[in-house]
Image (cartoon, rainbow, N blue to C red):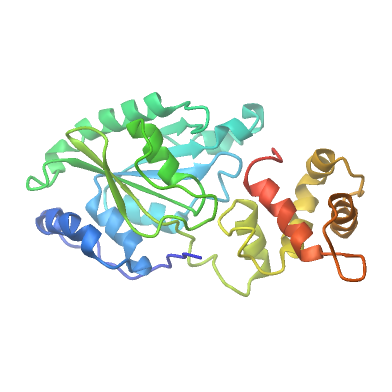
Amino acid sequence: MIIMQRQKFSYGKKHASSMVSRSTKLGNMKKERPKYPELADKIIQMSDIILEVLDARFINETRNPELEKKIIESGKKIIYVFNKSDLIDMKKIDKQMISLSPRVFVSCPDRKGGKELRNKIKITSYNVKDKVDKKLGKVTVGIVGYPNTGKSSIINLLVGKPIAGTGADAGFTRGIQKANLTSEIVLLDSPGVISSKEYSSSNLAAISRHTKVGARSYSQIKNPEIAVNDLMKEFSALIEKFYGISAKGNSEELIEKLGRKKGILKKGNLVDEDKTARLILKDWQEGRIRA
């Protein structure tokens, strides 16, 4: 599991001094051994424009106030990218979240929103060209967001071919990846970032929230039954309908009935609750159960 925690970083230096070493750092990026606590700050420092990739189903939950504050304080431009828009009913989107601007709704599987996002990047790049590192000679667009919000898929959609590696598990991207959008614009992908204020390996409520939005993989989480219980509090009707099981909102009853229905049993003809709960989380995180 890759978690990038908050690290002290000074943004008080003049922009000119940060640009002097930027091109050198970019050129050596692939040679560096990833140090995850430092990567988020590097992305912001090295970029002229930041794309914050959010899960369109859980816009508020996947926003990272810490990163947004750093981006604003560093004077960089930000574009909000609402990914996985194919998994939502647009009528149910929180109006307050839609007020985030500039923004683009994107669906990578349906290849929707890519053209609009490319245009917004190009338009924004015109406004930052005078601040671009002359040695690098390109506008740099950093891509940040929670694990599993689809940052690498966004890069592939933008460039029109599978350049960045993608995976179903949160934390698939192991370091900063670089790709050219145009001859004048370069994209930087990064591992997922969870707010350090929110992250705690012993905070069950936080773990459940992260599992809901896919920031913690169903295969990695401890006590998956707890995460299923929290999902059932909000989405019991959707989940029960998907499996064709009536559990009256009770997660234990759902796991018991589903385990027997799927034959997920262990010694003594007992339901394997751990495996059954992980199946539910897997179906949820992979978008089979649609919110």
Q: Nearer the viewer, residue 21 or 273?
A: 273
User: Position of 20 compared to 234: left or right?
Assistant: left
- Residue drawn at (52%, 50%) of the image: 148
Position in image of residue 74 (x %, y %): 27, 53
Q: Quadrant of residue 162?
A: top left
Position in image of residue 126 (x %, y %): 20, 31
**Residue most toward the bottom?**
202
On screen, residue 236 above or below 12: above
User: Position of 246 compared to 41: left or right?
Assistant: right
Position in image of residue 243 (x %, y %): 82, 42
Q: Quadrant of residue 116?
A: top left
Q: Nearer the viewer, residue 170 or 4?
A: 170
- Residue drawn at (45%, 27%) of the image: 113
**Count of all numbered marks drawn on residues in the image:** 0
User: Position of 52 compared to 285: left or right?
Assistant: left
Q: Nearer the viewer, residue 213 or 11?
A: 213
Quadrant position of the C terminus in the picture: top right
**Residue most toward the left?**
135
- Residue drawn at (30%, 33%) of the image: 121
User: Position of 146 compared to 180: left or right?
Assistant: right
Position in image of residue 123 (x %, y %): 27, 28
- Residue drawn at (47%, 27%) of the image: 111
